[in-house]
Image (spheres, rainbow, N blue to C red):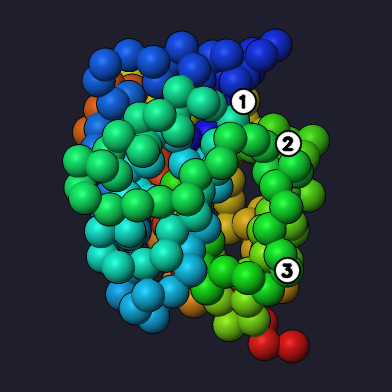
Amino acid sequence: MGNEKTSPNPAQMWDERYSAGEYAYGVEASHHLQNSLHLVPDGSKILFPAEGEGRNAVFAASKGYDVYAFDMSKEGKKKALELARKHSTQIHYEVGIAQEMQYPENHFDAIVLVYAHFPPNVREQIHRLFQTWLKPGGLIILEAFHKDHIEYNTTNPGVGGPRNLDMLFTKELLESDFNDCTTNSFNKEVITISEGLYHQGEASLVRMVARKNQS
C-alpha cells in the first residue's frame, strides 16, 4: 500500500505490518475502484502493483476479472491469497518490486494503483514502466494521497500516508509521469477514511482515471 515511511529495509517493514492477524487496511476494496471498475470490460486482465494484502485485487477477481498483483512483501502475498480463498476466487500474485517484474508490453487492460507511493528517485521510471505494460486504450485507475495530505498526517499520524512530501501527488505530477495517457477524470478531495488500523481520519486524496493513447 505504498511506502508510508522510509526504512533501510522497506520489505521488512511491510512484512512486519502485514504479519499481524488483522488486515492492516481492512478487507474492503477502495471506493474509487468499486466506482470505476465498470469502465473495464468484463473478464479483462488487470494488474495491481504494490497490492499489499490483496483487498482490491480480490474484489476485482470476485467480479470475474483476470487479476495479477505484486508487492515487495511476502507476508502481504500470504494474506492476499488467504483473502482470495475466503472469497472462493483466485489471483496471480508475485513478490518483488516494479523494476524487477517481467510483464510483457501492451499486456493489461487496466492497471490499478491504490496508495501505491514510490520513492521519488524511481517514481517516474516506475510510472512510465506501467504504461508500457498497458494496452493502447487501457486504463490507469489511481487513488492516492495528495501533497496537501502532509498537513493531515502531521496532525494525525493515524491517518497514514507517506511523510515525505516528494512521495505525494498532484494532478500535474501524475499527468507528467503518465505522459502516454489522457486523463478522463481527476478529483482531489478531503474525506474521512476508515480502512483497517492504519488509515483512520481526514485525508487529502487524488482519484484519477486515465486512458493510454491509441498511438
Task: Look at mark 2 in the image and give the residue it sits on.
Answer: 120
Q: Between disc 3 and disc 2, whose residue precedes? A: 3
Q: Between disc 1 and disc 3, whose residue precedes? A: 3
Q: Are marks 2 and 1 in contact (CB under 8 Å)?
A: yes
User: Looking at the picture, how far across and down is residue 83, in whole percent?
Assistant: 27, 38
Q: Between disc 2 and disc 1, whose residue precedes? A: 2
Q: Nearer the viewer, mark 2 or mark 1?
A: 2
**Which residue appears at 49% of the width and 17% of the height?**
15
Q: Nearer the viewer, mark 1 or mark 3?
A: 3
What's the amino acid at mark 2?
Answer: Pro
Quarter assignment of residue 72:
top right
Task: Look at mark 3 in the image and give the residue it sits on.
Answer: 105
User: Looking at the picture, how far across and down is residue 170, in whole percent?
Assistant: 58, 51
Look at the image and tell me whether residue 151 can be seen: no
What's the amino acid at mark 1?
Answer: Asn
Depth order, front residue of 81/204: 81
Position above or below: 29 against 38: above
Q: Residue furthest bottom?
A: 215
CA gap between label 2 and label 1 equals 9 Å
Depth order, front residue of 112/165: 112
What is the secondary structure assignment of the residue under circle 2? helix
**Which residue appears at 47% of the width and 50% of the height?**
92
